[in-house]
Image: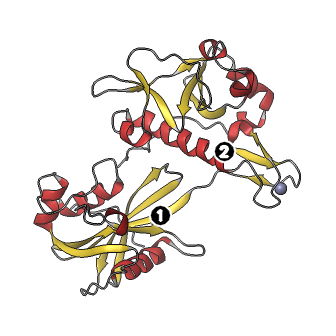
């Protein structure tokens, strides 16, 4: 299945990125389309149940923004003869928004966009934030500059190349027979909000090892029969959520009180009400998040892809 923030249709243009002169020429062409982002929020055109990214032509933005802003474009990719870029306009005040246009929170607007545009937004947001955080070399501390249309930053002194990072997160629905466990993090204490257990995959660790470790740390349970379900890019700032189902081999919960305020067993019936927003007991994540789909597919008895980990 394709989650929100996946499904980006663009060809990311690995070859064209190597020709920076051509990329610069293309960025000023009639076929260049720009996504403008302010404080990492995309410029969107509201349409009821069908909002769109408000793409801008170079002609239009070149009359508004300074050369400095325009030269800092990030190339996203191309499709059907058009090339797509993202521009950070956080410092620019000159843009006058048209009717129905506004800079929207990426997470809130993503569900209103088409699948493809939510994928493009995911790439654009993650890239812009990475550039903001990588202005200086992590090896020697000197300034870095952007190359290959934003696909690499190179240190001016030691020449080290820094590439956009993606942080893998294991997220898992843990079940045993007709019940599953969901947890509430400290940050959501007393909110009634429960979700799948999740955590960053550690260095030198496989997905299945991370699933076992995270479940053990957060709930005290031992799991086996780990099956891959699907994955979701999550650009806050640059995670890849790797969703699994895992069968609990033990039952007694002993959760980490530093991290979690509650971890509990729920019946299939209780969880089914929650995913349909009909539960008075708990709330669970909505369809924007992979956790929703991990829970839903277990409730519906759907078999995940047969990739046993
Ligand atoms: Zn350096």
The image shows residue 224 at horizontal and vertical percentages of 35, 81
Name the one closer to the observer, 62 or 244: 62
Q: Which quadrant of the figure shows ligand 1?
A: bottom right
For the question of whether residue 8 can be seen, the reply is: no
Q: Residue furthest right?
A: 157
User: Mark on residue 131?
Assistant: 2
Apparent side of residue 40 relative to residue 153 in the rendered image (left or right) = left
Color encoding of the figure: secondary structure
Task: Assess disc 2: are there few (<14), some (14-19) or many (≥20) residues with their C-alpha within 10 Å of its C-alpha.
Answer: many
Q: Residue at x 57, y 56 (%)?
A: 166
Residue to which mark 1 is pinned: 169
The image shows residue 144 at horizontal and vertical percentages of 79, 47
Q: Residue at x 47, y 18 (%)?
A: 97
Does 194 sit above or below residue 177? above
Does 264 sit above or below residue 200? below
Whole-angstrom CA distance, mark 2 to mark 1, is: 21 Å
């Amino acid at each position: 299945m394709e989650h929100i923030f996946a499904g980006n249709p663009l060809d990311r243009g690995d070859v064209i990125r190597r020709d920076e002169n051509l990329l610069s020429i293309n960025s000023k062409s009639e076929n260049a389309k720009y996504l403008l982002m302010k404080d990492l929020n995309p410029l969107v055109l509201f349409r009821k149940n069908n909002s769109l990214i408000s793409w801008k032509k170079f002609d239009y933005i070149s009359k508004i923004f300074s050369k400095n802003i325009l030269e800092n474009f990030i190339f996203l990719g191309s499709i059907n003869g058009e090339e797509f870029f993202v521009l950070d306009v956080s410092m620019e005040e000159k843009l006058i928004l048209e009717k129905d246009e506004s800079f929207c929170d990426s997470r809130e607007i993503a569900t209103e966009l088409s699948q493809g545009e939510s994928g493009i937004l995911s790439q654009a947001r993650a890239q812009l934030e990475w550039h903001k955080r990588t202005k200086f070399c992590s090896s020697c501390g000197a300034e870095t500059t952007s190359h290959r249309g934003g696909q690499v930053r190179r240190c001016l002194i030691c020449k080290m190349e820094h590439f956009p990072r993606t942080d893998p997160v294991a997220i898992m629905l843990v079940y045993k027979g007709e019940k599953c466990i969901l947890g509430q993090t400290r940050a959501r204490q007393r909110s009634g909000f429960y979700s799948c257990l999740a955590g960053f995959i550690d260095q030198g660790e496989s997905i299945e090892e991370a699933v076992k470790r995270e479940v053990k740390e957060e709930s005290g349970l031992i799991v086996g029969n780990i099956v891959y379900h699907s994955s979701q890019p999550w650009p806050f700032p640059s995670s890849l959520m790797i969703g699994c189902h895992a069968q609990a081999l033990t039952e007694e919960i002993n959760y980490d009180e530093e991290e979690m305020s509650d971890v509990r067993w729920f019946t299939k019936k209780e969880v089914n009400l929650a995913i349909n927003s009909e539960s008075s007991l708990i709330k669970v994540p909505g369809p924007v998040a992979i956790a929703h789909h991990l829970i839903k597919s277990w409730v519906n008895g759907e078999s995940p892809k047969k990739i046993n980990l």
